[in-house]
Image (cartoon, rainbow, N blue to C red):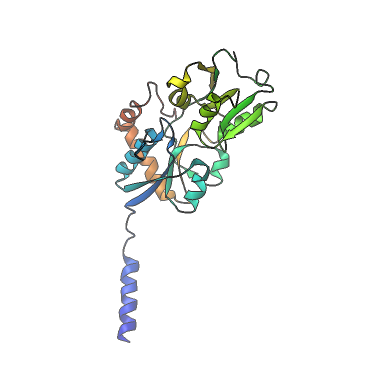
Amino acid sequence: MIRTLTGALALAILTALPVQAQTKLRVGVEGNYPPFSMISPDGKLSGFDIDIANAVCAQMKVECTLVQQEFDGIIPALNAKKFDMIVASLTITEERRKAVDFSDPYYDVPSRFVAKTGAFTEATPASLKGKKIIVLRNSPRAKYVQERFKESEILLVAKETEVYLELIAGRGDIAFGSSVVSGEALLKKPEGKGFAQVGPTVILDTTAGAGVGIALRKGEDDLRTKINAAIKEIRANGTYKSLADKYFDFDIAPKS
């Protein structure tokens, strides 16, 4: 009888205690999307996404562990609880909202076509008819070219950096990617000599609200609220600008 009463009393006390705030989080990142995420030869992660992940965690006063994950499997890995949130330049789209929830956007960058200098004066469905467009698979950009360039051949690759490697190798006529990444991964490098951006910048119509957000599992509203508050605070206190200025010479912040 004493054991039973003691066990019941202990359970009642534990139940009455407030739930301890989560102090450790795992963050899914990629590593193949310069200057947003990169992996050095010694395995160290760096880039704007990495800095933002660390800044948001610091603002929330939680200890975060970065978990490197290939982009194709990053959302399934989140839902399999391999990590707790994703900071990997995920554009907010209605399709992705079916699988995950998003924070408020933390940056927004337009897209751009890139090809050999002089190969194209514009990038329209008519000018690219019969041409091969290289683009990152499972991305809003892939959806964009598949829907609009129906008479072009589409070469889908696994990583954003591979978009430009395939272009250099001549396995496609033109590439479509981030206006920033195309500069960092191709145009600013020696192997980028002889290549140029084509046409105006492209703003993808996501219908879910422009921008790139931090993804988390469905229903984790408390964590999302804390992440949104952290993003707002690092923008207000100057942390965001100091991080962005390390990588960009223009305003990358979302307009909303």
Viewer-proximal residue among 112 and 18:
112
User: Which residue is situated farthest in the bottom direction here?
Assistant: 1
Q: Which residue is depicted at the point 31% across and 76% down?
A: 9
Horizontal relation, residue 112 to residue 151: left or right: left
Vertical relation: 215 (above or below) 20: above
Residue 68, by quadrant, is top left
Q: Residue at x 38, y 49 (%)?
A: 26
Name the spot of residue 76 as percent of width and height, x first.
52, 49
Give the percent coordinates (x, y) of residue 12: 33, 72
- Which residue is situated farthest in the front direction here? 169
Image quadrant holding the C terminus, namely top left
Residue 87 in sight in this render: yes
Residue 98 point in image, percent of width and height? 56, 45
Frontmost residue, 110 versus 130: 130
Quarter of the image where one finds residue 169: top right
In the rendered image, which quarter contains the N terminus?
A: bottom left
Q: Is residue 206 visible?
A: no
17, above or below 157, in the image: below
Decide which of 96, 69 is in the foreground and name it: 69
- For the image, the number of numbered tags is 0
The residue depicted at 30 percent of the width and 41 percent of the height is: 59
Picture coordinates of residue 106, whole percent (x, y): 42, 34
